[in-house]
Image: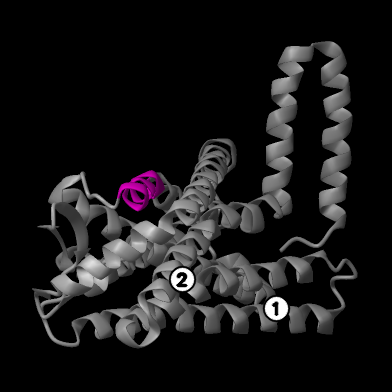
Amino acid sequence: GDWLDYLTYNGQSNSTLYEEVVLQHNSMCEGFCVALVVVNMTIFLLGFCGNALVIWIAGFKMNKTVNTIWYLSLAISDLMFCAFIPITVAYTVTEEWIFGRFLCKLVPSLMFLNMFSSIFLLVIISIDRCVSVIFPVWAQNQRTVKKASVVVFLAWFLAIALSVPSMLSRDVVSHLGRTICFNNYTVQHSHKTVALSRFLASFVIPFFIITICYAIIILKLRTNRMAKNTKPFKVMTALIVAFFICWLPYHVFILLELNIHHHGYSIVYIGLKVGTSMAAANSFLNPVLYVFMGNDFRRKFKSTLLSKMENAMGDEGRTTSRYLSRSSSMDGRASTHI
């Protein structure tokens, strides 16, 4: 979804459109580009720090369970996604690809890899929670760390396979004194095929599965009257809404890009940039929604901070933190865990 992706069709560049695009872009970019840079760098900082914290706690501070494998895999995926945001920000600002052909192929491919892997992991987490609520006894016996690791491996393998077209199609070209990294679709209809398959594989099908899973969970909890506390319902609603809001604009403008001449350059350009930023925002929302709102992770986070405070504050800190740890664990047991 870069702003020059559509300039090549069947391997032929359209020089007139290129010049028009550059002129329009230069006249409209100043304020918009500054806003994009601020938003994307904020997403980068929050996403990188938030996911690094998740990896530190889930990977090194918690016992290895099925849930921590989901958390850890999701955080690694989102961290990788966030790590390459500064390169795309630099490209947005300069509109000059200075990173060479290898990174032109690698960076977008890694971002698509993490888009797919992140979304597939959200689907896995949804199915896992759904199965745990419907078949609690079976899930308790069958949910093992080894099986979870195999499922994660398969999700990453599928994500890699779906990211290969991006690596094959990316290329670098110098035109009118400017070097760009773009999608060089040399086979007729390949652009449309890639865009539609991504839309189905990374949005329509995952969103359908996630919605069905959480609908079943909510119905089951209401039927059993398990949750007088409304927090689990709020969390589930937040998960679905965040997924929908973050990813829908991106895919809509990727599809509009297929008929760029009918929709106008300015609309598609702005839409793609905003949509890409909103999709990236999902990478820092995931640790908040999936991890920090989970009771087990939050307790571990609190107890880790409290243990640091103990060392710093001495005996008085120990007494206070023990009391806080006991009260937080009692709160955790009292509330419904999702």
Residue type pointed to by label 1: Ile
Q: Quadrant of the N terminus?
A: bottom left
Residue 148: percent from left, percent from top: 46, 61
The residue under the point 9% across, 75% down is 11
Which residues are the magenta region? 84-94
Q: Secondary structure at mark 2?
A: helix
Q: Quadrant location of the C terminus?
A: bottom right
Q: Which residue is mark 1?
A: 217
| Camera-nearest residue between 272 and 240 | 272
Q: Is residue 85 magenta?
A: yes
Residue 95: numbered disc = none
Q: Which residue is mark 2?
A: 271
Is residue 165 shown in magenta? no
User: Where is residue 332 drawn, in percent x and y?
Assistant: 81, 50
Does residue 264 appear in this view? yes
Please state which of residues 53 and 7 is positioned toward the viewer in this rendering: 7
Q: Is residue 244 left or right of residue 28?
A: right
